[in-house]
Image: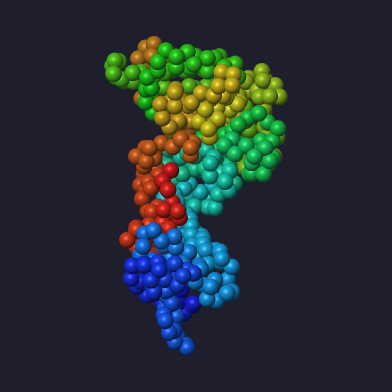
Amino acid sequence: SSLFGWFNLRTWPLPPCKRAGSFTCGKVCGLVQSAAPPASGPVFIALASRDPHCPKRRWGSTMKDFVQQQLGLLAPTTFSLLFTGLALAWLTLLRKRAGGIRKGSESTSFRAEARPRSPSSASQSSEEEEEELDPGRRTNLHGTLIPSGGLIIADAPKPFTFENSYCTGSILPMHKPTKNPELMSSGKYLYGDHFHGRKRLWEFRMQFQFKEKVEGNLMIGVELDSYVPLNAAAKRLMAITVSALRQVVGTDLYHSVGDDPTNSPAPHEKPVFMMPLWAFDQFVVTPEGEEPPDLSDPNFSKYGSLRADDRKQFVQKITELELVPGPTYTFAVWGISQFLDCVKWELTKIIPFKPIDFNLFCGAPPVHVVMYTLNTKGALEGEKRHLQTRKSYFLRFALWSPLHKPTAAKIRELIPNDGDLGSRRGRFQSASKKGFLERMFGCCASERPH
């Protein structure tokens, strides 16, 4: 009666339908009006017949017919439309509430995201709420520096800074929104003007100020967490991939699938693909006291030396480069990006029309972008492996695709200050706290796991 109180109606139990008896009105089967309704006050009606064969058994049809017959004001479908409208309005409200719950849970889970900042910023704040991200960034490259300052999402407006025993620096990962072709072709995303008309899928920019002179050859490349067993087909594909990459960066690179810990003695080498400094595509040396280029500068591509201008001269200049305290060294790399789509987590252009899943070679995300030198002191004579005991890391950046995430346990290991990062806890509202209509329509309005 509360739902239809505005009609001033009441329900009245109805004895078994006798069809020809006094309990039917003849026109609307199952609807009985009191023999002598009062001049004012409620009209007593029965909403349904108890006869299972009665064609008017459904209370909705009976109520609709009664309103049409008694009031003569409403079209036959008005009641159904009214009820449907109320239900849709309630569903819309529930969906908005569910959206608020999802948004709140994401803000909580990702509260320690590393905030983009300029090199002059004092510290990253893990207490700030996650910034509003456009769809292109939400599906873009994810990662974290090691040690972690929080989650990093590519195409940030400012670089992320770091410091370790050997240097201070900043990094700005940039990636085309390859999962969103319309957005990518429109160029209406941050750094869209820079990527427009260029084959590169991503670009990594980084800046260093060294605390001491760098001894040995500083290298950049990719490192995996552990050994990944490969079958014969995967090994052939890897050989083809390495050959394609050599054509871009040259033959002076080091590649190893690592040591299988199950059949080789320690120490073990991790899988690595490392390149010399001249694998970079751009570098700038800024003397001490002068302002280095901003990694997010729209004109960044015009600064310093470019490999594309004169490859031979570029290789010579960067090979002769001395990395010492004082100057600021700025680098950018993108040459091999045309083969590596870090958002789709695929290798492309290796086999015509056939992308290769990253996980075939790396096992599972993340993949580490690293820069290190090798210590020759204490190494066994003839030892050429890149063992962990020989490495001095200047940069470690673990990356993954939001479409191919590491396990929640792995993310907690990478970003220990965000223990709930990647967990689904808190995303669903308890059913015991829902109201009647919310429980009724919960299957339509609640968030589904994905």
**Residue farthest to the front?**
20
Residue 396, x across and y down, in percent? 45, 34
Residue displayed at 50% across by 31% down: 345
- Please say whether residue 325 is visible from this viewpoint: no
- Say whether residue 18 is left or right of residue 234: left
- Say whether residue 210 is left or right of residue 147: right
Residue 263, x across and y down, in percent? 29, 15
Residue displayed at 52% across by 22% down: 275
Residue displayed at 52% across by 28% down: 346
Residue 29, x across and y down, in percent? 44, 67
**Residue farthest to the top?**
382
With respect to residue 198, does 275 lie above or below? above
Residue displayed at 41% across by 53% down: 443
With respect to residue 424, does 57 lie above or below? below
With respect to residue 446, does 269 lie above or below? above
Residue 324, x across and y down, in percent? 53, 31
Write down the quadrant of residue 312 in the picture.
Answer: top right
